[in-house]
Image (tube, helix red, strand yellow):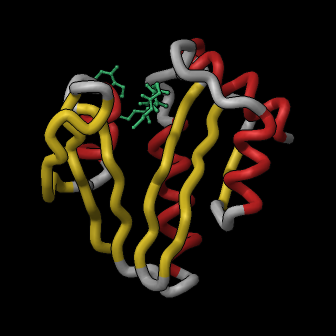
Amino acid sequence: MFDELSNLHKKCFPNKPWSADDFRELKQSGCEIIMSENGFVVYRIVVDEAEIITIGVNPEKRRLGIASAIIGIIEKTTKSQGVKKIFLEVASTNTPAQKLYENSGFKVVGLRPKYYDGVDAILMSKDI
Ligand SMILES: CC(C)(COP(=O)(O)OP(=O)(O)OC[C@H]1O[C@@H](n2cnc3c(N)ncnc32)[C@H](O)[C@@H]1OP(=O)(O)O)[C@@H](O)C(=O)NCCC(=O)NCCS
C-alpha cells in the first residue's frame, strides 16, 4: 500500500514527492489514510476536529468527482467518530484545490502569510 501511495503521490505532486517511508511514518504517527486506485487522502483526528493533510487524484482521472467523493467519505467516517469540524490549509496559488473545497462546503476562515515557501496558505473549515 505505501509503495502505491508513493507512486500516486509523485504523479499528483511531482515537485514534492513523498516516499513510502514518509507515508509509513504518517500512519505510525496516527494519521488516517484512504486510498483508491486513482485518489488518496491523508487526514488526522484530534478530539472533535479532523485535519485534511493532503489529498490527490491521478492527473489522468481529474474532474470526475473522485476528490469530492473522498471528501464525502471523510465527512461520513469522521462524523460517526464524533468529529464536528474539518479544517485544512491550501496554497493561495492552488485554484483547483480551493474550488474543490468551496464546492464541498468549506469556508475560508484564515490566512497564514508566506506559509509555503513564500506563498500564503488559506485556512478553510467546514462544520459537519
Ligand atoms: C485538487 C484535486 C485533488 C481535485 O481532484 P478532482 O478529483 O479532479 O476533483 P473533483 O473532480 O472532485 O472536482 C470537484 C470540483 O472541484 C472544482 N475543481 C476541481 N479541479 C478544478 C480545476 N482544475 N479548475 C477549477 N475547478 C476545479 C470544480 O468545482 C469541480 O467540480 P466540477 O468538475 O463539477 O466543476 C486534484 O486537482 C489534484 O490532485 N491536484 C494536485 C494535488 C493538490 O493540489 N492537492 C490539494 C492540496 S491542498
Residue 57 x %, y %: 56, 28
Name the residue rendered at 18%, 46% in the picture.
Answer: 112
Q: Count up the numbered dots.
A: 0
Q: Ligand 1 is found in which quarter of the picture? A: top left
Compare residues 56 and 21 and report the one nearer the observer. Answer: 21
Q: x, y percentage for residue 91?
A: 28, 33
The residue under the point 14% across, 58% down is 109
Residue at 52%, 47% in the rendered image? 69
Q: Is residue 16 above or below residue 128?
A: above
Q: Is residue 78 visible?
A: yes
Is 70 situated left or right of 103 in this image? Answer: right
Residue 35 vertical position relative to residue 10 in the rendered view, above or below: below
The front one of 106 and 116 is 116
Q: Quadrant of the C terminus?
A: bottom left
Give the image quarter of residue 100: top left
Q: Locate residue 34, reporting x and y percent.
A: 68, 51
116 above or below 85? above
94 versus 80 height, above or below: above
Residue 61 appearing in the image: no
The N terminus lies in quadrant? top right
Instruction: Answer with left or right where residue 119 lies relative to residue 74.
Output: left
